[in-house]
Amino acid sequence: MTSYGYTLMTEQSGPRELVRYAAAAEAAGFDFEVSSDHAFPWLEEMGHACYAWSLLGAVTQVTDRVELMTYVTCPTMRYHPVVVAQKAAALALLSGGRFTLGLGAGENLNEHVIGAGWPPADQRHDMLEEAVHIITDLLDGGYVSRVGSHFRVDSARIWDLPDEGVPIGIAVSGPRSVERFAPVADHLIAVQPDADLVERWTHAHHGRSRAIGQLPVSWGPDRDEAIRVAHETFRWFGGGWKVNAELPGTAGFDAAARYVRPEDVAGSIPCGPDVGAIVDAVREYERAGFTDIALVQTGDAGQEAFIEMARSELLPALRGS
């Protein structure tokens, strides 16, 4: 049975608001909640970028049931993999085993802040694979020392570990990344309903894996206003991750999206009061084999209304009840 999630967008809401939305989303019946992990928003208009790990720590204390997840953390530049392992173990303990560590190769937008430059894609994937091995070894317990191509680890140990471990998901975008990362991760993360991608990953795991997707929507009673909000905050989305990963800042995203029209956004994101349009978009992910789908409601102002609508209309429609 498909699980339906709510996205805590750290780029468009402040941390106190996000904690409130997290509690409301659980009460509304969402199955899981994912948090973005950014140092910058994609666009100036979004206006936020709180620290995801502090946010999720607070969310563990206002929720009891929903699974929590980073969607996704880059464990190679802003964060050393040893630090990521320590944070993941703490969240797993605080949440009572409800945390999944979602990882990815990162974006220039966020990782440039440490002043180390932005490596080419092949190097970023090398770094990610090495980081995953370090994180996995630390979460398995005991002391870890390692001298790799990108990271050094000297007698590191995580002292507070959950008994049940921490599942790891990795964001992938094509056959090569599936081949590389399926052997070192538990679950697939992707942002397009690509059936071939899911099939390749599932085959590598002999069917014992989850495929976790994400779908932006702009629900609201006024379709024109919903389109305006989607265009204001999500016009960057259509560039695709191969482009988006390389852009260095909000000015770059604004320039890249300069010619994206409101009607272009409305053509790619369900906008307005039609719950059926959201259901249809979710079904596309389900047909592609996704087991978990997190919804992103664009903009901050409409979050609570969206959550209430999900409780009364959307989630029952998705679950056929």
Image (cartoon, rainbow, N blue to C red):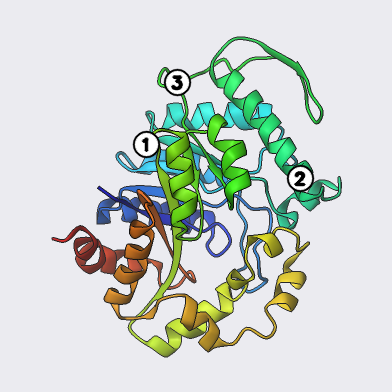
**Residue 162 numbered tag:** 3
The front one of 143 and 28 is 143
Amino acid type indicated by mark 3: Pro
Q: Is residue 305 left or right of residue 153?
A: left
Q: Residue at x 54, y 16 (%)?
A: 140
Dot 1 alpha-carbon crowd within 10 angstroms: few under 14, some 14 to 19, many 20 or more? few
- Whether pointer 3 and pointer 1 mark residues with C-beta atoms closer than 8 Å, the reply is no
Cα–Cα span, label 1 and label 2: 28 Å
Amino acid type indicated by mark 2: Asp
Q: Which residue is mark 1?
A: 207
List x then y, in percent, for residue 315.
Answer: 24, 61
Cα–Cα span, label 3 and label 2: 33 Å
Q: Residue at x 81, y 50 (%)?
A: 120
**Residue 311 numbered tag:** none
The front one of 228 and 125 is 125
Q: Which residue is mark 2?
A: 122
Cα–Cα span, label 3 and label 1: 25 Å
List x then y, in percent, for residue 101.
Answer: 51, 37
